Amino acid sequence: MVTMIPYLPEGVTPELYPFAGKYLTLKSGAKMHYLDEGAGAPVVMLHGNPSWSFYYRNLAQALRGAVRVIVPDHIGCGLSEKPGDDGYNYTLKSRIDDIEYLLDSLGVKENVTLVVHDWGGMIGLAYAVRRPERIKKLVILNTGAFFLPDGKTFPAALRLCRTPLGAVLVRGFNAFARGAAWVGCKRRRMSRQLRRAYAAPYNSWGNRIATLRFVEDIPLAPGDKAWPLVYGTQEKLTSLSTVPMLICWGLKDFVFDGHFLAEWRRRFPHAEVHSFPDCGHYILEDAGDEVIPIIKRFTDA
């Protein structure tokens, strides 16, 4: 494990991302970058695709004075190593194993508050049902931990990404990261500076491998690799039924829309829910001034 100030890609300034990062070599040999700030009860924040730990920068700064904030970059994302397929197995199982290995290495095995967004929800909740005794609270931000809810169809834009043309657009032109930053906020458009920062780690064909592999790994049929894991996770979500849950949701998310929110409500009827009708996928960007104090109050309680 090496503590260091990570190299910041062009477009990400120390003012935007004021952290000293750390690295952990995983069992796969890949190096995972993560933030470990503050002291106290652990709050673990898991990002999705195609974002990175940058998404949680303001929340991490707001919380680190009272708790221990741990924010990893998944392999292939953010400031973590981005190996080819010969150096890392880009699957849901690998992601879950990575998080467990990171937290075990840091001695984080109890009283964990999980904050999850996008693919971070599937990774985090799969870890949570694997180790339910470790989970103290859950914060859910525009994500899923189950198959597509009734009435929800797989978005055409994501289906395109799973085609040969889509692969060229994602890896050749960074279309997924740039596109997500462009459409991810609805209350107010992300500034050009922020859009550049979100896309900055994905600055070459090789460095965009994870943004494509994440989409390819979404299970749509029983033969898909991640299908058994997603099925097993959704069946075990009841093991978390007594865990306090906070849900903050942008209703204009074109993927994780009202169908997903309704499914969360159905499965966790006692959850505290705050929905934002004019906000999109990147809820911490769209409504950070409102959502961050809500999360801080929930984690402090």
Image (spheres, rainbow, N blue to C red):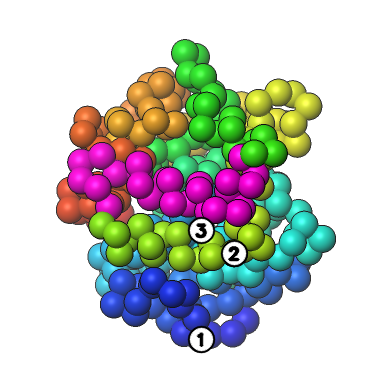
- Residue placed under numbered mark 1 in the picture: 4
- Residue 283 in the figure: left or right of residue 10: left
- Residue placed under numbered mark 3 in the picture: 110
- Residue 295 in the figure: left or right of residue 35: left
Mark nearer the N terminus (3 vs 2) = 3
Mark nearer the N terminus (1 vs 3) = 1
- Residue placed under numbered mark 2 in the picture: 204
Pick whichever, 105 or 254, lies toward us. 254
Q: CA distance from mark 1 to mark 3?
A: 27 Å
Which is more foreground, mark 1 or mark 2?
A: 2
The reply to whether residue 104 is visible in this rendering is no
Helix, strand or loop under label 3: loop
Amino acid at pointer 1: Met
Vertical position of residue 262 compared to residue 80: above or below: above
Q: Which residues are magenta?
A: 166-190
Amino acid at pointer 2: Ser
Q: CA distance from mark 3 to mark 2?
A: 39 Å
**Magenta-colored stretch includes residue 4:** no
In contact (CB < 8 Å): disc 1 and disc 3: no
Residue furthest to the right:
86
Vertical position of residue 249 compared to residue 209: above or below: above
Helix, strand or loop under label 2: loop
